[in-house]
Image (cartoon, rainbow, N blue to C red):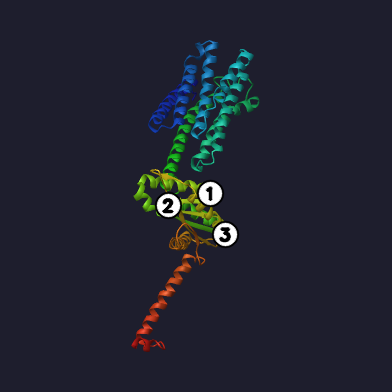
Amino acid sequence: MSLDISTLYLVATLVAVMLGALLLFFWRQEKIPALGWWGAAYLVGALSIGVWALLGARLGEPVLLAINIIGYVACGMVWTAARVFHGKAPNWAGLFAGAVVWAVTNVMLGVGPVFLHTVIGAGIVASYATATASELWSDRRQSMRSRWPAILIPLLHGAVLMLPILLGGLLAGPEEAFATNNTWVVIFAIELVLYAVGTVFIIFMMVNDRTVRAHKAAASIDPLTGLLNRRGFSEATARMIEREARAGRPVTVMIFDIDHFKSINDRFGHPAGDEVLKLFAVVMNANLRITDLIGRIGGEEFAAMLPCSIEETLVAADRVREAFQNCGIEADDMPVATTVSIGVAGGPANTELDVLLASADTALYRAKRSGRNRVETAVEEPLSLESGRRKLVGQATLARVTSAVRQAGAVPGMGAEAGA
């Protein structure tokens, strides 16, 4: 069965128009600029292919040149959309580079050999396909679920264009390699439709992945301070503990409690209290390392986990305390005292977060009882959860046995004391 080339390219045009309109619709709905670029690229490409397929034989050379230039601009727009999707600015020179190369080479070559014109055009499209794949590869945040297809599809598109050029000498003469009735032209027409549909499918996969990541981030971030919330802090520290345990390195936890925070809210209002919380978040970010994890785990309570020894953590804790104390902020033309009490606890590799937090919390309350605006360290090295449970169970059992013995008067001295 033979396939009519004009019909195939007409189908490709209709598919591109439909997908372009779909992408523009979702661009208006979701307000994602890259979707607008992709949608416009599909419509511009559809215009080029449709006019070439329907009217190509009746158009003069200048019009055909303009139609081809529009097609290469569409290829540049697809590459630009990939850049915009990952937060980069449009590269206007790169966007029009393919069209300029095509125009210049056509002016220089004139009518020239068909095969040579085809090689140049295929090379431009393949270059844009490779550049698009490179943009998607360079974004390390992209999840693997959509990343590999997003890279492979444009590369395969470029390969389909270049393969007949590379094998043209083996399969046919140079001029016959891209004749309109050649098998490669039919294959390319079919691949063009599949590429258009597959690319849109990948686009929506990437948009969905980004939306899921945004929702996950929103669920793990405190909206006021921009720090991790309690859930996000727990998940991030679990990964840090596991990583440091594999390397046999200790971790240390700090708990911060802003002193007299309730009185700040009562005297100056909750907006002032919110500003103090945001200020403390800024102070923590400025005085801790980028590798340290920071979170807001309560109203005025913050926590940090550091992959280092407790001695290093104590230095960092005192640095945060001094920086916050010296902020010198005012509310209603009155100075606001900004001090913080800090509890620090460290443990060996693989110490559970809850155990470290409990030890640091004990040290924090000791800092508050000792006058606030100070750093206190946990007295005892924290136990593992299992060891802690065994210790508590043993203490409870001993207490029950002792109580039973006292009631029976079997412990020397206890009976007389009870009688007294």
Q: Which circle, 2 or 1, is nearer the viewer?
A: 1
| Residue found at x 51% / y 52% | 322
Q: Position of residue 16 (x, y in %)?
A: 45, 25
The label shown at residue 356 is none
Q: Quadrant of residue 416?
A: bottom left
Label 3 or label 2, whichever comes before in sequence order: 2
Amino acid type at circle 3 is Glu
Label 2 or label 1, whichever comes before in sequence order: 2
Q: Which residue is mark 3?
A: 311
Q: Which residue is mark 1?
A: 287
Against 124, residue 145 (above or below) is below
Gap between marks 3 and 1, in whole Å?
A: 16 Å
Q: Quadrant of residue 116?
A: top right
Label 3 or label 1, whichever comes before in sequence order: 1
The reply to whether residue 221 is in sight is no
Amino acid type at circle 1 is Asn
Gap between marks 2 and 1, in whole Å?
A: 23 Å
Q: Which residue is mark 2?
A: 231
| Residue found at x 44% / y 37% | 207
Q: Residues within 10 Å of mark 3 (few under 14, many from 20)?
A: few
Amino acid type at circle 2 is Arg
Secondary structure, mark 3, is: helix
Closest to the observer: 218 or 364? 364
Q: Residues within 10 Å of mark 1 (few under 14, many from 20)?
A: some
Q: Which circle, 3 or 2, is nearer the viewer?
A: 3
Against 40, residue 290 (above or below) is below
The reply to whether residue 145 is in sight is yes
Q: Residues within 10 Å of mark 2 (few under 14, many from 20)?
A: some
Q: Are marks 2 and 1 in contact (CB under 8 Å)?
A: no
Q: Quadrant of the C terminus?
A: bottom left
Q: Position of residue 227 (x, y in %)?
A: 45, 47
Work out which residue is located at the far right of the displayed protein and give it.
169
